[in-house]
Amino acid sequence: MIAATSPGVAIGADAASYGVLVLVVVVSRHFRAPQPLPGGDQSVVRALRMLASQPAVLGTTLLCVAFFDLYGPVEVALPVFVSQTLPPARVFWAATRRSSPSARRSAP
């Protein structure tokens, strides 16, 4: 968006999205939450039981939890680990990773 217009337009669009968020919050305050079912157990155990009864949802949930728990620390810690343990010539990938793809293409 910035490349096609200007930074001001991008910041304006971001501000407008917050305006929409405020509008949604104000409108949602006029609605009441549904009442729980009578005699229904509203607990974590019930939610986990329901999750276990749907294998596709359970598998997707476990896959997402595993991915974000394992991949997140690698994304943050690997560049730090490499920059501290390898000599400067070996850290070239970390420097090029931070630059934009267009900057790498225009390099000789």
Image (tube, rainbow, N blue to C red):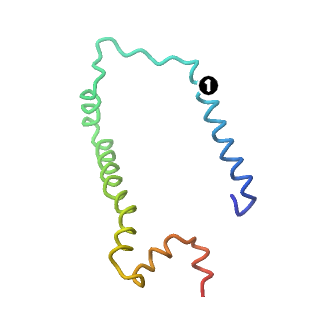
Viewer-proximal residue, 57 or 1? 1
Vertical position of residue 9 compared to residue 78: above or below: above
Q: Position of residue 33 (x, y in %)?
A: 47, 19
Q: Residue at x 66, y 36 (%)?
A: 19
Q: Where the C terminus falls, by quadrant? A: bottom right
Q: Position of residue 25 (x, y in %)?
A: 58, 28
Quadrant in the rendering for residue 83: bottom left
Viewer-proximal residue, 95 or 106? 95
Viewer-proximal residue, 92 or 24? 92
Task: Give the left or right position of residue 1, taking residue 36 as reference.
Answer: right
Vertical position of residue 78 compared to residue 42: above or below: below
**Tag 1: amino acid:** Val
Q: Which residue is mark 1?
A: 26
Quadrant in the rendering for residue 34: top left
- The kind of secondary structure element at disc 1 is helix
Furthest toward the bottom, the residue is 108
Q: Where the N terminus falls, by quadrant? A: bottom right
Q: Residue at x 36, y 67 (%)?
A: 78
Q: Position of residue 6 (x, y in %)?
A: 75, 58
Q: Position of residue 62 (x, y in %)?
A: 29, 47
Q: How many marks?
A: 1
Quadrant in the rendering for residue 29: top right
Task: Give the left or right position of residue 71, taking residue 3 as reference.
Answer: left
Viewer-proximal residue, 8 or 17? 8
Q: Residue at x 51, y 70 (%)?
A: 98
